[in-house]
Image: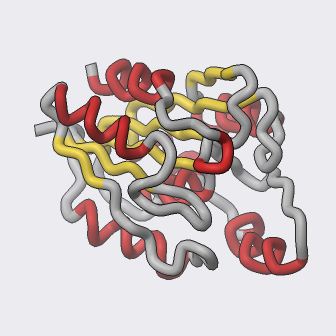
Amino acid sequence: MKRVFIVHGWSGYPGECWFPWLKQELEKRGFQVSVPQMPDADSPAMDTWVPHLANAVGTPDKDTYFVGHSIGCQTIMRYLQSINGQVGGVVFVAGFFEVLKLYDAEEQEIAKPWLETPIDAAKVRNAAKNFIAIFSDNDKYIPLENETLFKQRLGAKTIIVKNKGHMGASDNCPQLPEALDAVLEISG
């Protein structure tokens, strides 16, 4: 059975924005879908988020897929660089490498390890066969230059949507058809 793990972002939770909608749409199509509550979501830390995801996944295989939002994308990449074997693919929504807009000292301190600890893009590429990255043209946190980084570093297909902000709870985004289409494309 094809499994999908949806990883929410910073200050996120499983029932926000488009996550319940995507879970329901994928389950209608026969996927097993999990949206784990990540630990201490208001202060996301690599040393807790990555092992938490690994524990939720158990044994990954080619029928394992991921959808990440924002820092959830970072979590997925850091998880993938740590595994042996290959998963089916990943959909990144509002993801970033080291380019992020932060607004206060507390955010900068929380984000610092995520931004300064390099991601081994070659290991990430080896761990999945398909990557699609979705960006909004008016995201207040994720500059569009990340689109180029996902293309260059992961060979990701990229999609730019119009006027959807950060595609999170504060952007009134209860559905994200582009994410559903991307999962269906990488798993088809």
Q: Nearer the viewer, residue 121 or 188?
A: 188
- Residue at the image point whose x is 66% and y is 29% from the top: 151
Say if 100 sits above or below 113 in the image.
above
Look at the image and tell me in which quarter the N terminus lies: top left
Is 54 positioned to the left or the right of 162 in the image?
Answer: left
Say if 172 sits above or below 108 in the image.
above
Is 161 positioned to the left or the right of 141 in the image?
Answer: left
Q: How is the image coloured?
A: secondary structure
- Residue at the image point whose x is 23% and y is 39% from the top: 62
Relative image position of residue 49 (x, y in whole percent): 47, 72
Q: Nearer the viewer, residue 61 or 95?
A: 95
- Residue at the image point whose x is 57% and y is 36% from the top: 173
Report the residue that reaches farthest toward the right.
Answer: 104
- Residue at the image point whose x is 78% and y is 27% from the top: 137
Report the residue that reaches farthest toward the left.
Answer: 1
Relative image position of residue 86 (x, y in whole percent): 31, 45
Q: Nearer the viewer, residue 39 or 171?
A: 171
Q: Quadrant of residue 12?
A: bottom right
Say if 163 sits above or below 22 in the image.
above
Q: Quadrant of residue 28?
A: top left
Relative image position of residue 45 (x, y in whole percent): 58, 77
Relative image position of residue 26 (x, y in whole percent): 26, 32
Look at the image and tell me in which quarter the C terminus lies: top left
Is 38 positioned to the left or the right of 27 in the image?
Answer: right
Number of numbered tags placed on the structure image? 0
